[in-house]
Structure formats: C-alpha cells, structure tokens
Amino acid sequence: MKIEYSAVEELNPRDRTGIRMLLEHLCGESLNTECQMPGGADRKECGNCQQCMNWAVLSKRLELESLCLEDLNDLLILVDQFPISQGFFETFLSPQKTEISFDELKAGIISFKGFAVLLFGNVRFAYRLMRSLDIESLKEKLEGINRPASEVLEGDFAPRRPALPLPAEINNKSTWLLGYIARNKADRDLTMFAAIAATLGVADEEGFLKNKSDNIRKLFEQLKVRLETTSLWKEIYPDYQALQLTVAGLQEEIRESRRCGWLNTSHYLALDHMDVYVATSMRERWEFEEVHNTAKKIFAASAVANLKLRYFDPTQSFLENRVDKGLVEALMLKRARCTIYMAQETDTFGKDSELATTLAQGKPVIVFVPKVDLEQHAKTAASRPVAYLQRRLPLLIAEERIKSRYVAEVLDFLKKTSSFDPYFQVIGAEEVAFIAENGLTGEKIKMCGILAEAERDLFNSRAKSLQKSHPLALQVKLETGVANGVLVVRSVSECSELLRDLLTNSCSFRFDEEEEENVLALIEATSQCPYRVVTRNTTVSNSFWSRYLSNRDRTKIYN
C-alpha cells in the first residue's frame, strides 16, 4: 500500500514551524512551540518561559543526522505529547532499523496517518490508542491492512484451489428468465397462447387458469376479448402447431433456467469464500445480458486471474420466493469482502441499499459506470425491441439529456410506434414487419444514435456526481463511525485492477486538502475518488467522536 501527502513531504522538520506541523500530523492535534510571553508575532523570544526552554533543548535534537526512538520521544515530550512505544516506532516509522533520517520520519508519519484515517477516521484517537502498544497488539488493531501485497497473495490467495465452475451456468440469452419482474413478458406470452388455444377450442380454459393468480386471470380475459374482436392474429400466426412448439420451447427454457439457477444458488451457499458481491438492478432482458457479460469480463481479466476469486452473480441465481432470495443475497452481501455496484440505465432502491449496506460494514464499494461508445451503443440499441426506445427516450427527455433540436423528432417517432401492440412480446417477430410497413427503419436507426448520445452524457454526469457530490457516495461504518467513500471506475480493466488492489493491500492513496472545503480526503489513485474523509470542523469532529459511540461500544471495539 502506498500513501502520499505532499503537504507533509514538503515540510522542513529541522525548523520550528516544520517540526511542529510534522508532529501535529502524527498526534492529530494542534501543538504549541512558540514563546508564551505576550507581545505579538514580531516580538523577540523571552528565553524564560517553558516553551522557550523546551525549544532550546528540542532544537538540539534537530541537529542530529538521524533519530532513534529515544530522540523522537524527547521531541514528543518537549511538545507536551505522550511518547511512543518500541512497537509503534518499528511498525510505522522504522521497520527493521534502529535509527531513521528526517525524511524517513516524514514518510513514517504519512504512513501512520494513512492507516489512522483508513481504520479510525480520526488521527488523534488513533495516536492515543496505538502509541503505547506492542507489535502484536498493533497487528491486531491494524486488521492486516499493513501487510505487504506479496504476503497477502501468498497467505490468503495462493493456498486456494482454483474456483470451481458453476454447476449449471445459464446461457446469457436465458438469464432474464430468472427475474421476477422480467419474467412478466414470458408469462404474458404464455397467457396469450392459452387465450388463443381457448378461442380455437383446442384447450381447456379452466385447466390453464387453475391455481393462477388474479392478475393472470384478468390478463387472460383481456387477451381473449382482444382475440375475439379481430382476426388479424390468425393471419400473423396461421400455424397453431408451430406456435405450440415455440411456446413449449419457452416453457422448457423457463424450467431449465430456473432449475440451473436453483442449483447455482446451492453452489453459492456452499462456498467457503465469498470475495465479491455484484449489485445490480435488472428489469429488462437486455439488463440481465449486460450484467452477465460485464461480470464475466471483470473476473476473467488478467489482473485478478491469480486470486482465484469467488463472486456472487445474481444473473445465475434463483429461488422460488422473494423471502429466500432476499435472505441469500443478504448473506452474500455480509460475507463478501467487496461490492461491485453496476451503474445502469436506471438504479433501484434495492441496489442503492446494497451499496449503503456495504459501506456501513466498512467494506469497499467499486461503482462501475461504463463509458458509452456512441457507435457501439447505437448499434446495440438498434438490436433491441422498440419497447426499449419507448421506455428510455421519454425518460431521457424528462431528464433533459436529449438535445432540444431532437425532441420534436423523438416525440414524433414515439407517437408513430405507440400503436404497436404485438400479440407476443417474446416469441413473436411482429416488430420487424411493423417497422418495415410503417417505413420506420431509418427513423429507428436515427433514434438509436440520439439515444446513445444522451446515454453517454447521462453516464458521464452520473460518474461525476458519484465522484464529487452524490449523497450516497459517503457512508459511515455503523460500528465505528468511520466515513467510507465509493470508488468510481469507467472500464472493465480499471474495475479488475482496482479490485485486485483492494483485496491485496496494493492501493495507492494521496491526502488531498483541496478536494472539498474544510475536509481532508484520502484519495484512491485509480478512481481518483475520496476513499476516506476527515472533517476539519473541530466542533463537528469533537461532537461526533464524543457522542457517536457509547462508552460500552467504544470499549468493545477499540480495547
């Protein structure tokens, strides 16, 4: 782990101001090395107050070429701070050395401050807690975040056997059949076929409706009325036997996908390790496909190949009821060491709560906000059903993402396609004929280009919001009160590299005093996002750390 702090690196620890500021960074509170006698900034030192006496002794220590533990403790005593232990000196300031240079002292203090902010969110408290501990106690307090990446790899990941494949990986095109909401379209098509069969008198109406929900019963009646008022469906689907085979294929695909999803869930429940939870919001078929494709790419990347990671992919898991599904996902979220939050066209309460829950556990969240390639996105949009455009374009207009010069054209296109009401939404091919008959092929292609441009602007804006201003981007760990920030990435390679760094203690951080006014931020290098923040409002800080934890909680957590 690498931590930089230019404000500390630039200090001159051999002058009065420099050493005072350097020790303030170590102790986490203001120190006073100035003469106590009144007279203003331009007065001469009296030479007779305690501070002048202390400085006369302290300044001699600053003439040394190097500092041992005894010298550093002399400095701390002379600025009215408690001394540090041999364990603290060796852990943070002088690994395997008895003396350090002043540059090494600066580097050690930066390292300690980084660990203090990462773990405790408060340097003063961290110093007071850890300054007197021995090496073993410090290791326990640091929770392993100071372990070198090589040690983490050899100790945590190398002994693992390669992850077993899913027992029944579901085809990308069938993943949507596991969704409780996405499956509505398939249920509608099955109901439409039952209504056709009943209208033709080749199937028992009650046999189909037995044990069906009230919603399906109402839908069946509506569809049957539609079939009875027009014969157009007979022209579009003249071959009942062929239609029956297609419906039977859909039913078998649903059964097999759910069986595989159930089997995969048992696999997830049995795993000894759970490294990453993938948080998503999936309502439409294409959303399942995109999430599955992206997750596969992230975990197949060379950056994480040697970690043998176990991850929970919601596009491969299924259980019959929402209670069991919710319990499984809660367990996966609790066990995982990190969450990848997939920023999508729309986000949901469930996915946002998973982000907040991860941060509240003090675990990192990587937010993947894809960069939109205009040509590829337009091509992908064109391959999707017109329902996709009917859903997304009005939302993008409402969010003022579509340029004003295109709005009239977009509304005209939506009006022309509003009459399209296919008999079958999944198994049919009515849209191709509708688009061709109404001369909308060119218009659809143009709408996809307009949509791609709007989506690019939307995703760019969302990435910026999450990096800089979104209220969900910072949450406190409920147990300790430490403020944690999300880490935003824009590509698969960035995501996999950051994931590797987080899991192996390989992250690079820098302290930033200008990211936000009156806030000290610890910025992660890959995402350039605040990973930890510390307020410089002394009243807020004092009140928060005095009152956030009860004495009982404080003793339980920090002793």
Image (tube, helix red, strand yellow):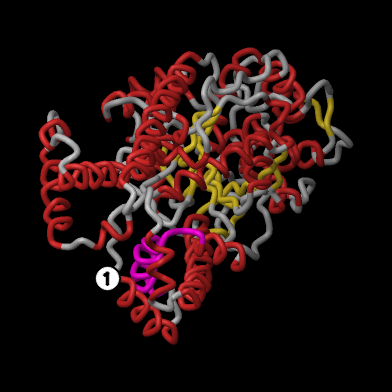
Over which residues does the magenta segment extend? 383-400
Q: Which residue is mark 1?
A: 419
Q: Is residue 221 left or right of residue 504?
A: left
**Relative to residue 512, is residue 555 depicted above or below?**
above
Q: Position of residue 263 (x, y in %)?
A: 44, 19
Residue 125 in view: no
Front residue of 170/527: it is 170
Q: Position of residue 70 (x, y in %)?
A: 75, 24
Label 1 amino acid?
A: Ser
- At x 57%, y 49%, the residue is 36
| Magenta stretch encompasses residue 388 | yes
| Magenta stretch encompasses residue 309 | no
Most common SS among magenta residues: helix
**Relative to residue 164, is residue 386 depicted above or below?**
below
Q: Position of residue 238 (x, y in %)?
A: 32, 53
**Relative to residue 138, is residue 506 depicted above or below?**
below
Front residue of 382/291: it is 382
Under circle 1, the secondary element is: loop
**Residue 91, picture quadrant:** top right
**Relative to residue 59, is residue 44 depicted above or below?**
below
Count of numbered badges drawn on the protein: 1
Give the residue furthest to the right.
Answer: 65
Front residue of 352/391: it is 391
- Please state, as top left, top right, bottom left or bottom right, where the N terminus lies in the image: top right
Q: Is residue 423 left or right of residue 59?
A: left
- At x 39%, y 63%, the residue is 431
Q: Position of residue 228 (x, y in %)?
A: 13, 56
Residue 398 in view: yes
- At x 21%, y 41%, the residue is 194
